[in-house]
Image: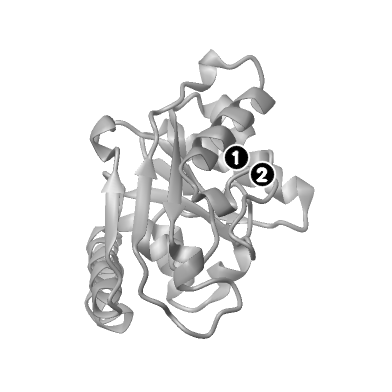
């Protein structure tokens, strides 16, 4: 499905310089690919969100299924913070830049700070953003420690933060797994949190973590 989307989307990107067609086709590819794989997801709480607003979405991360499952369920196009190595892939890197994705160098603190500043400008321009605050996939389904960068970003940009709990992807396709299992999948959108209502970055971090944790299955919950 991604190849089909690329055949139509990349020429449109190069001709128009706009990412809209490629982004729409990518969402179609994600939805169709998941359906063909027999994956079915139930979404809760999305009605709380205003499609006209820019949000900073933060979700738990246990599987490579998380991005293609969750992105089509977001109310509007978003930017994504991704490791800089992905931007070096021919064509794919061009598309990520056109989509205003943010490259993150996790090995260079100064470069990482610059990425956060760029992300602040992107959010303040009105484009939403999706991040996985754990920074990598959890191997056991439980929450890993959260990186501080996304919460510094939230406080600087002063846009609402929407915690999201993804349920079932660890059981469907865990990190290191070779076989895809068909299990019930759920996406829970929690009420938006206003960073201005928190005295510090750490308080916001704890609130987001508590919300995400609240909908995890008992065996994975803190």
Q: Which callout, 2 or 1, points to the residue nearer the camera?
A: 2
Residue 75 position, x and y percent, is 26, 44
- Give the Cα separation between the discs numbered 2 and 1: 9 Å
> Is residue 172 shown above or below 66?
below
Q: Secondary structure at mark 1?
A: helix
Give percent across and percent down for residue 96: 44, 62
Residue in the picture at 29% in, 38% down: 45
Mark number displayed over residue 55:
none
Kindly identify the residue that appears in the image at 76 percent across and 46 percent down: 110
Q: Which mark is residue 150?
A: 1
Q: Is residue 133 left or right of residue 16?
A: right
Q: Residue 89 or 54: which is nearer the viewer?
A: 54
Answer few, some or many: residues within 10 Å of disc 1's Cα (few below 14, many 20 plus, some between 14 and 19): many
Q: Residue 212 in the image: x percent, y percent? A: 51, 41
Residue identified by numbered label 2? 146
Q: Is residue 18 visible?
A: no
Kindly check if marks 2 and 1 are in contact, taking CB atoms under 8 A apart as contact.
Answer: yes
- Report the number of numbered marks: 2
Task: Identify the residue shown where x is 45% and y is 27%.
Answer: 159
Quarter of the figure that contains the C terminus? top right
| The one of 43 and 69 positioned closer to us in this rendering | 43
Question: Which part of the image, by quadrant, shows the N terminus?
Answer: bottom left
121 and 141: which one is in front? Answer: 141
């Amino acid at each position: 499905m991604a190849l089909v989307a690329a055949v139509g989307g990349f020429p449109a990107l190069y001709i128009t310089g706009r990412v809209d067609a490629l982004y729409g086709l990518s969402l179609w590819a994600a939805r169709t690919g998941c359906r063909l794989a027999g994956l079915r997801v139930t979404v809760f709480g999305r009605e709380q969100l205003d499609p006209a607003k820019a949000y900073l979405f933060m979700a738990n991360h246990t599987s490579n299924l998380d991005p293609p499952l969750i992105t089509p369920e977001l109310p509007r196009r978003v930017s994504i913070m991704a490791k800089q190595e992905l931007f070096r892939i021919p064509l794919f890197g061009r598309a990520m830049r056109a989509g205003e994705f943010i490259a993150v160098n996790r090995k260079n603190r100064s470069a990482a700070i610059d990425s956060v500043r760029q992300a602040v400008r992107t959010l303040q321009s009105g484009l939403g953003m999706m991040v996985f605050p754990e920074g990598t996939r959890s191997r056991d389904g439980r929450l890993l420690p959260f990186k501080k960068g996304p919460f510094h970003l939230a406080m600087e940009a002063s846009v609402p933060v929407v915690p999201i709990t993804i349920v079932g992807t660890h059981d469907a396709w865990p990190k290191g797994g070779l076989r895809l299992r068909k299990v019930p999948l759920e996406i829970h959108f929690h009420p938006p949190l206003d960073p201005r209502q928190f005295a510090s970055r750490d308080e916001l971090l704890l609130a987001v973590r508590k919300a995400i944790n609240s909908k995890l299955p008992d065996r994975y919950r803190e």
